[in-house]
Image (cartoon, rainbow, N blue to C red):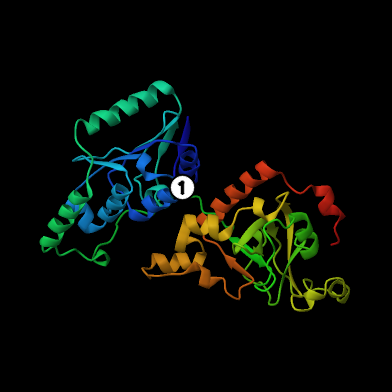
Amino acid sequence: MELYFENWSEEFFKELKKTKSLRVISPFVQAPTIRKIEERFKLNHLELITRLNERDFALGVSSLKGLRFAVERGAKVYGIQKLHSKVYLFDKRVAIVTSANLTGGGLIDNIECGVRLTEVPLIDELASYFDKLVGGQLPVTTEQCEQIQKSIASKKIILPKSEFFADHGAEPHREKSKTAYYIKFFGKGDSKEVHSYPVRKYVNDSGCHYACTFSKRPRQVNTGDIVFISCMVGNPDDYAIFGRTEAIQHDERRDNATPEEIKQRPWKKDWPVYLRVKNGEFIEGAMENCPMLWNDVLREFDSRIFYRTKARSDAGEKGVDPKKSVRQKAYIRLSDEAGRWIDRKFQAALRENGAVDQEYLNSLPK
């Protein structure tokens, strides 16, 4: 048995990867979440019990568009009145009973609580519960989705503006970390590395085991902040996150490349400013063995990937494009959620591929 409290999307998609048949009970469903599932899983192997309440769709707490998308791709969707249960069944291997809906809030943002079960009798009982809820009804059709949409459109519904109403509850208690997460970008657009480029060689070439280099002083980063090290790769274009380090706050009296260091690595003439780092860990193998900024992290967090793009998105700004935020940037602060997610992803890659050994790192110049 295992408990999930918040941001359990990684566990959800990890289980989904091993699943042939997914059965979900969720009152509310959102289209972006359904589309993320469809990227990794054939929706004709999904059975979903949800609500078909026009008010839910009109207020946007659930997505009729998302349900129709699932139905069009072969999912079996059933509507139940007064539904409040949330259950996820991954074949007959794993069941998760939770407070979380099949939405971005449920999987990532909200304060939730759930339990992961692997006991066969309990999973069988939950499967029977699913079957009893369905009863003898037929799955929802695209025609029914159209009828519901027309019914909503025919009603002159005046929706309340959300800014008129305040939430008078207290802020949920979260452990506030003083640690900020950053990602440092190495490489240039006209000289991207191949995905098979060895991490060891890149660490040696860049010197990132003891310092990250900049053209301007990185005053934003504090001692103890986590700095992920990434390399620009091509075909397909991405940033391979191959290192994890702890920052030592920049000291402009000390943290500058010496003439000897510039002589050893001439490119430091343009990047002579240091942010020293310690306790570096680097993934053994090639860049292709590492988490990818766009393919992995952006796909998971979209506009919530960076500290500032998340703030803009939370403020209601539409069409926030995170990729524009990294143009001409040597580093950028990640959102706390994305930083913690990358940390888990990075540790998983270390377990799978191993770490560049400390003896090798100690042999490199400092």
Q: What SS does tag 1 mark?
A: helix
Q: How packed is label 1: few (under 14 Cα within 10 Å), some, or many (20 or more)?
A: few
The mark tally for this picture is 1
Quadrant assignment for the C terminus: bottom right
Residue 31: quarter of image? bottom left
Residue under the image location 57 percent in, 74 percent down: 327
Residue labelled with disc 1: 40
Nearer to us in this view, 197 or 277 = 197
| Left or right: 264 in relation to 47 | right
Position in image of residue 314 (x %, y %): 40, 64
| Left or right: 327 in relation to 27 | right
Residue 222: quarter of image? bottom right
Nearer to us in this view, 104 or 238 = 238
* Badge 1 amino acid: Arg
Position in image of residue 245 (x %, y %): 69, 56
Residue under the image location 44 percent in, 24 percent down: 119
| Left or right: 300 in relation to 365 | left
Residue 192 vs 33, above or below: the answer is below
Residue under the image location 28 percent in, 28 percent down: 129
Observer able to see residue 273: yes
Position in image of residue 354 (x %, y %): 71, 44
| Left or right: 338 in relation to 62 | right
Residue under the image location 50 percent in, 55 percent down: 337
